[in-house]
Image (cartoon, rainbow, N blue to C red):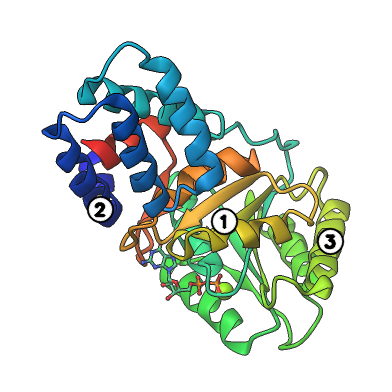
Amino acid sequence: MFSTLREKLSKTRSALKQRLDALVQSGKPREEILDDLAEALILADVGVAATEKIIDSVRARTLKTDSFSEIREALKADLVERLAKAASSAPPAVPPGQPEVWMIVGVNGGGKTTTIAKLARRFRDRGRKVGLAAADTFRAAAQEQLVLWGRRLGLDVVTGRYGGDPASVAFDAVRHAVGKGQDLVLVDTAGRVHTNANLMQELEKIKRILGREASGAPHEILLVLDAAIGQNALVQAREFLKVSGITGIALTKLDGTAKGGIVVAIADELGLPIRFIGTGEGEDDLLDFSPAAFVDALFE
Ligand SMILES: Nc1nc2c(ncn2[C@@H]2O[C@H](COP(=O)(O)OP(=O)(O)O)[C@@H](O)[C@H]2O)c(=O)[nH]1
Ligand SMILES: [Mg+2]
């Protein structure tokens, strides 16, 4: 798994590595090393605010040395601690006899439907009885996409009329789950313009309906963010945080981007656990987020 993550993060890693390798033999004094590190972090989309905090912390940890390798180790330690603050927390307990319900939200194209397929596959393989709700009724193709995944994974998909009320699809899906003894329902949602107030109202309505049908539902509201858009992911996240009760982040498309530092910016700014990372388009390209594994994969 470690080598997979390493491979998947290769773009971000090699961009960082180039800059760090240049520093190894440079014999530069500490302040210059710190300046160069700050630049490397910003180029990897860690963002200015988080980079400043990180560099201050590394400076404080390495007051007495100009050794690049000591500074580099201090940087790694800081990053692991910073990411660990945002690492996965335990999901809430679900009362017995009713389905656990997850709602997946985020901008169109970010990877919601694909992430649902990956989660469904993972939990199905662990013996859970998973149902899918195609509550993105806004785009015709969006429901079809989930139906195709359901067919491939052998899972029921509850759909609705194109342009219909997404909350009623969510309602039907929970009823269906109870009838079929499903213990996990993953609800896909629309994500058209993230500045659209209607979308946020629609998501609140889905939440309300889910809560009425299953106690404590939605038990997880996962915000899907696309790492490949770098700092814009933070802008999107701030919009979606207007929806109350988001419990965690799934960060997709970490493969093929040199902007992997966005993980650090998100962890630092949003104060939400990064629960999963997406590393490809396939149904098994989903990893639990581990701060130490992530930092190792970037720096080793
Ligand atoms: N490379 C890569 N592509 C992804 C990942 N997750 C999703 N995608 C692709 O991103 C595109 C949009 O994904 P989709 O799930 O339809 O996004 P949605 O509009 O939020 O439901 C699709 O082409 C997916 O295959 C990922 O982790 N890595
Ligand atoms: Mg979709």
**Disc 2 packing (10 Å; few <14; some 14–19; many ≥20):** some
| Vertical arrangement, residue 251 with respect to residue 144, above or below | above
Instruction: Describe residue 137's horizontal placement relative to residue 4 as left or right.
Output: right
- Residue type (three-letter) at the residue carrying disc 2: Ala
| Vertical arrangement, residue 296 with respect to residue 115, above or below | above
- Residue type (three-letter) at the residue carrying disc 3: Glu
Work out how far the residue at label 1 is from the one at label 2, CA to CA, in angstroms: 40 Å
Q: Residue at x 62, y 51 (%)?
A: 184
Whether label 1 touches label 3, CB < 8 Å? no
**Disc 3 packing (10 Å; few <14; some 14–19; many ≥20):** some
Question: Could you say whether the residue bearing mark 2 is in a helix, strand or loop?
Answer: helix
Q: Which one is nearer the viewer's eye here, 177 or 189?
A: 189
Whether label 2 touches label 3, CB < 8 Å? no
**Disc 1 packing (10 Å; few <14; some 14–19; many ≥20):** many
Is there any visible trace of residue 171 in the rendered image? yes
The mark total stands at 3
Is there any visible trace of residue 83 in the rendered image? no
Quarter holding residue 104: bottom right
| Sequence order check, earlier mark of 2 and 3 | 2
Residue highlighted by disc 1: 130
Residue highlighted by disc 3: 204
Q: Which residue is drawn at 21% across and 51% down?
A: 14
- Residue type (three-letter) at the residue carrying disc 1: Val
Q: Which residue is drawn at 52% across and 58% down?
A: 231
